[in-house]
Each structure stands twice: as structure tokens, then as C-alpha cells.
């Protein structure tokens, strides 16, 4: 049943508050990041001839810390927030703000010190959560800062399944060091957090690798919202050091045999060609004049992507890692 309440949603995660204002009609669910189809487009929406001069606040609640967006399904709004060392999953009635259910679980996390910037994260201090939840077929899927992937029943809040892959291992005694920058304190160890006495940079904890796979650090935590493809939930639990995508069966949570390691695929000529065809098919569907900032992620994709453009696209502004596509049309 589509949401019929007349509202406009505004989420202020940094201010630890969730506020609902009355405004124009909102006739659709908002079940995931960037609306129903993850394309930033809200279908069947007609802007009013005149927007209201002001909004009337209907209700507000203290929501907790984090930068995860709220999602709306049926007559409820769902939040993933942080309270101290706990992550909290909550469901509220959109019309009244009354809490329907709430679940929490312990998940300590030590972020990259460069992410603990007070003006950006005054409450969460870089501990997230960042990933927006997803509602699909009466189930709520959440991905926490330390890669805790959970599935809840949207009506009762019951936990249906959970995975905690590549979790951060926090040593009993944390040792800190300055990030390699060439200063006089490079490679020196410190017993307490703070700033480097030589360059002023924040000292970072050492050894924050994950328990399951040494070398894939968890400095930054998970940030990408999970998505649904066919009967699978796909979660990105990698980081800038290593991409790591896992597919799970939606109903059971069983890990799938789907293979998502893109690097060997890109280096394989046939695999790179398939990826190039998929990229071109997607660009052709958009019918856009310009597609800018298409990140390749690796040089091997540049040649197969740029080669079959033909009359569809012109190539410009090519660098080692990025291509900009412009439609070859008189109006482009």
C-alpha cells in the first residue's frame, strides 16, 4: 500500500534528530538509497504550482548519531543509527512518530583518525553508520559500520538472519603512529591517541586489520547501501584497499556462489569485453547527452570501453582512470 500521508521528509543525522514536516503529497514509498530504482528519480511526482512559504513540523524524535538516510515503506519510516557502542535499528509510524519496534546490537569500532572530524561527525565521531537501509518484500536489510549485515521482519522487528564478515579486530592494547608523511616522527609508536608532535596530524591506531582476511583493513567501515538483484542481496563490504562484494540469498541469508572479484575479470580480455558491453548498454539506455566522470577503477577497462563506441559516443578528456563520454549529436 503506497504511503498516503502528506509529508516531506528531512533527516538531520548530524544533529541526531529526525524531523517530519507537513508539505506536498508524497505518493510513493522510499524503500532504499536514491528512491525506488536507485536512480534519483521519483516517478509519478508532479511539483506543485507553488511551493509553501514555510513548513509545519508534525513531530520530531532524537534519532541517534550517523549519516545513514531514513527509508519509508508502507506507513513506517526505518532508521539505522548509533548510540555509543551500539547500532540501533528503529521503526516509527510516519504519521505520529510513535515507535513500532527497535533492535540494537553491540558493535565497537575504531575509525580512521582522519575520519574523526568534529565538524563532519560531531556525534558519531566517524563511527557511522553510513549505509542506508533497504526495504524489500516486507524485510529490512541493514549494513552497519563494522560490516554487520542484518535482515529484519519489517512488521515485528524480529531478526531473521545476520552476517558479520571481515569484522574489525581491536587489540587489547592499541598502539598509535603518525601516518607516513615524511615528518620526523614517521614510524614512531605512541601509547595514546593525539596529534603528531612533528606535523600535527592525528595519530592512527595500528593493526586494525580484519580477523578473517589479513591485509584488508577496516579503517573506514562499510558505507555502500546493500542492493537487491534477482533473488540476491548484494553487499559491498570492501574498502579503498580491496573491493569485496558478497551476494546472499534474500530469504535464508545463505552466502551465494556468485563471483564479484572484478580485477581478474577486467584483466581477462573476454571479461573486460563483457563489462564494456554492459557499460555501453547502460549509457545507451540513459539517452543522456553527457556522461561525465565514469570511473574505470583500473586501466585495462579503458581500451575495451572506448573501442566499440562507434557513432553512439565520442570520447574526450581521457585519463588513465577516467573517461568522459559525450553523445555524438548536433545538440551535444
Image: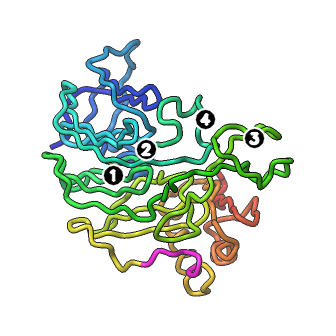
- Distance, label 3 to label 4, CA atoms, is 16 Å
- Distance, label 4 to label 1, CA atoms, is 25 Å
Tell me how the rendering is colored. rainbow
| Secondary structure beneath label 4 | loop
Q: Is residue 43 above or below residue 37?
A: above
Q: Which residue is mark 1?
A: 142
| Quadrant in the picture for the N terminus | top left
- Depth check: 153 or 174 in front? 174
Q: Is residue 230 visible?
A: no
Q: Where residue 17 is drawn, which disc sits there?
A: none
| Secondary structure beneath label 3 | loop
Q: Which residue is mark 4?
A: 117
Magenta span covers which residues?
A: 259-265
User: Disc 3 or disc 2, which is closer to the eye?
Assistant: 3
Q: Which residue is mark 3?
A: 196
User: Quick one: label 4 or label 2, which is nearer the N terminus?
Assistant: 4
Residue 211 covered by magenta stretch: no
User: Disc 3 or disc 4, which is closer to the eye?
Assistant: 3
Q: Residues within 10 Å of mark 3 (few under 14, many from 20)?
A: many
| Secondary structure beneath label 1 | strand
- Distance, label 1 to label 2, CA atoms, is 10 Å
Amino acid at each position: 500500500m503506497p504511503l498516503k500521508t502528506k509529508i516531506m521528509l528531512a533527516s538531520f543525522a548530524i544533529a541526531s534528530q529526525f524531523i517530519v514536516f507537513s508539505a506536498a503529497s508524497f505518493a510513493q514509498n522510499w524503500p532504499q538509497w536514491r528512491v525506488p530504482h536507485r536512480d534519483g528519480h521519483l516517478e509519478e511526482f508532479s511539483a506543485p504550482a507553488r511551493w509553501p512559504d514555510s513548513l509545519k513540523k508534525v513531530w520530531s524524535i532524537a534519532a541517534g548519531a550517523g549519516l545513514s538516510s531514513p527509508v519509508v515503506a508502507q506507513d513506517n519510516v526505518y532508521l539505522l543509527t548509533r548510540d555509543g557502542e551500539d547500532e540501533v535499528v528503529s521503526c516509527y509510524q510516519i504519521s505520529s512518530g510513535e515507535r513500532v519496534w527497535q533492535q540494537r546490537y553491540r558493535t565497537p569500532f575504531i575509525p580512521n583518525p582522519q575520519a574523526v572530524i568534529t565538524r563532519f561527525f560531531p556525534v558519531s565521531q566517524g563511527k557511522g553508520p553510513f549505509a542506508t537501509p533497504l526495504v524489500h518484500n516486507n524485510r529490512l536489510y541493514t549494513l552497519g559500520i563494522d560490516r554487520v549485515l542484518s535482515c529484519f521482519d519489517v512488521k515485528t522487528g524480529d531478526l531473521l538472519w545476520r552476517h558479520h564478515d571481515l569484522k574489525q579486530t581491536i587489540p587489547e592494547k592499541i598502539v598509535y603512529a603518525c601516518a607516513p608523511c615524511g615528518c620526523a616522527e614517521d614510524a614512531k609508536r605512541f601509547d595514546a591517541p593525539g596529534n603528531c608532535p612533528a606535523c600535527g596530524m592525528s595519530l592512527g591506531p595500528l593493526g586494525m586489520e580484519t580477523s578473517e582476511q589479513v591485509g584488508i583493513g577496516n579503517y573506514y567501515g562499510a558505507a555502500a547501501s546493500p542492493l537487491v538483484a534477482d533473488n540476491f542481496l548484494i553487499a559491498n563490504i570492501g574498502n579503498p584497499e580491496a573491493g569485496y562484494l558478497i551476494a546472499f540469498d534474500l530469504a535464508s541469508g545463505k552466502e551465494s556462489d556468485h563471483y564479484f572479484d572484478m580485477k581478474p575479470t577486467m584483466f581477462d580480455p573476454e571479461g573486460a569485453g563483457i563489462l564494456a558491453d554492459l557499460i555501453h548498454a547502460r549509457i545507451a539506455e540513459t539517452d543522456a547527452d553527457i556522461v561525465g566522470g565514469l570511473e574505470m577503477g583500473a586501466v585495462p577497462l579503458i581500451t575495451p570501453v572506448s573501442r566499440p563506441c562507434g557513432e553512439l559516443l565520442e570520447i574526450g578528456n581521457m585519463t588513465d582512470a577516467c573517461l568522459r563520454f559525450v553523445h555524438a549529436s548536433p545538440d551535444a
